Image: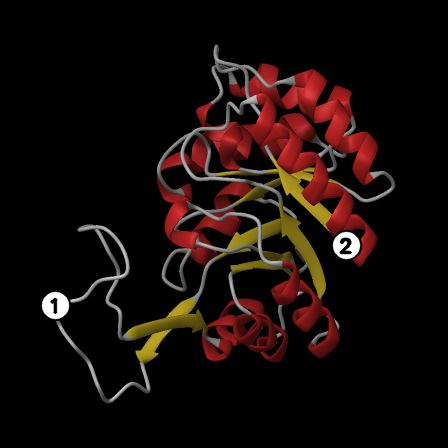
């Protein structure tokens, strides 16, 4: 019988952390701005989540959206955030830094690892835009990274499951390969059967209506590509239950 996998929930609010815990998740990846793929959360969000939940909180260290090749100033921000969240009691840090040629920036990753020590490091989906998945996997193993989050170098896990299965096999016990992106209730059993990973990264939201009654429709708080101002998204505890039972 296959061992029950560890379930990590990707989320961006304290309400979602609480829902993930109620649903039976093993841990969360705490971010802000999932519309950008996940950025560093606020300290207030982390402190409140830590106070209200006993779940393991893995914290995203990512100063902006877009690519993963950072300026010296952006990297200085990442260093400071890594120090802050380690001191605040994060259980792990989630980070990914690349060189312009699509290889992993070993020097900067080593610096973040040194700051985080003894906290574990998850290398996030920056992995999926590296130039060679097998070379990147070996680089992360050499660096001592504990886990890599990947969709198999495709937009979703369903498209990348063949490479994911190969990466899981190649990694063995040297590093955890954690599939993530596009895993749903409909495809999870198939993915588990094909990939055979020990951990999975899930995003399981449900939107609900804003409590606002006054809703001016000509004022927007973002650009033209925007989410509805009056729909709020949090992790759905019921969906988590379905995926963890």
| Residue occupying the point 53% across, 21% down | 133
Q: Which mark is residue 32?
A: none
**N-terminal label among 2 and 1:** 2
Q: Nearer the viewer, residue 78 or 218?
A: 218
| Residue occupying the point 75% across, 24% down | 110
Q: Quadrant of residue 57?
A: bottom right
Which residue carries the number 1 mark?
Answer: 218
Q: Is residue 28 above or below residue 239?
A: above
Locate residue 196, reporting x and y percent: 58, 44
Q: Is residue 157 above or below residue 236?
A: above
Q: Is residue 90 above or below residue 230?
A: above
Q: Quadrant of residue 227?
A: bottom left
Which residue carries the number 2 mark?
Answer: 91
Counting other residues with Cα less than 10 Å from the Cα at mark 2, is it few (<14), some (14-19), or many (20 or more)?
some
Where does the N terminus fall, quadrant-wise? bottom right
* Cα separation between marks 2 and 1: 43 Å
Q: Is residue 237 left or right of residue 186?
A: right
Counting other residues with Cα less than 10 Å from the Cα at mark 1, is it few (<14), some (14-19), or many (20 or more)?
few
Q: Residue furthest left?
A: 218
């Amino acid at each position: 019988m296959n061992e029950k996998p560890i379930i990590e929930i990707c989320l961006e609010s304290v309400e979602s952390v609480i829902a993930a815990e109620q649903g039976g998740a093993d841990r969360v990846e705490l971010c802000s701005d999932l519309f950008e793929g996940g950025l560093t959360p606020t300290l207030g969000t982390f402190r409140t989540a830590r106070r209200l939940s006993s779940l393991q909180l893995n914290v995203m260290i990512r100063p902006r959206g877009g690519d993963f090749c950072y300026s010296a100033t952006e990297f200085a921000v990442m260093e400071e955030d890594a120090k802050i969240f380690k001191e605040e009691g994060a259980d792990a840090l989630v980070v990914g830094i690349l060189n312009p040629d699509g290889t992993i920036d070993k020097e900067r990753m080593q610096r973040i690892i040194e700051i985080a020590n003894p906290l574990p490091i998850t290398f996030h989906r920056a992995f999926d835009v590296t130039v060679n998945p097998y070379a990147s996997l070996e680089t992360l193993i050499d660096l001592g990274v504990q886990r890599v989050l990947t969709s198999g170098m495709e937009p979703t896990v369903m498209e990348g499951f063949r490479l994911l299965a190969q990466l899981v096999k190649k990694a063995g016990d040297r590093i955890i390969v954690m599939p993530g992106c596009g895993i749903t209730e409909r495809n999870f059993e198939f993915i588990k059967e094909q990939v055979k990973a020990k951990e999975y990264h899930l995003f399981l939201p449900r939107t609900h209506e804003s409590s606002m009654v006054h809703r001016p429709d000509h004022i927007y708080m973002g650009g033209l590509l925007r989410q509805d101002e009056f729909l709020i998204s949090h992790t759905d505890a019921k969906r988590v239950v379905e995926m963890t039972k």
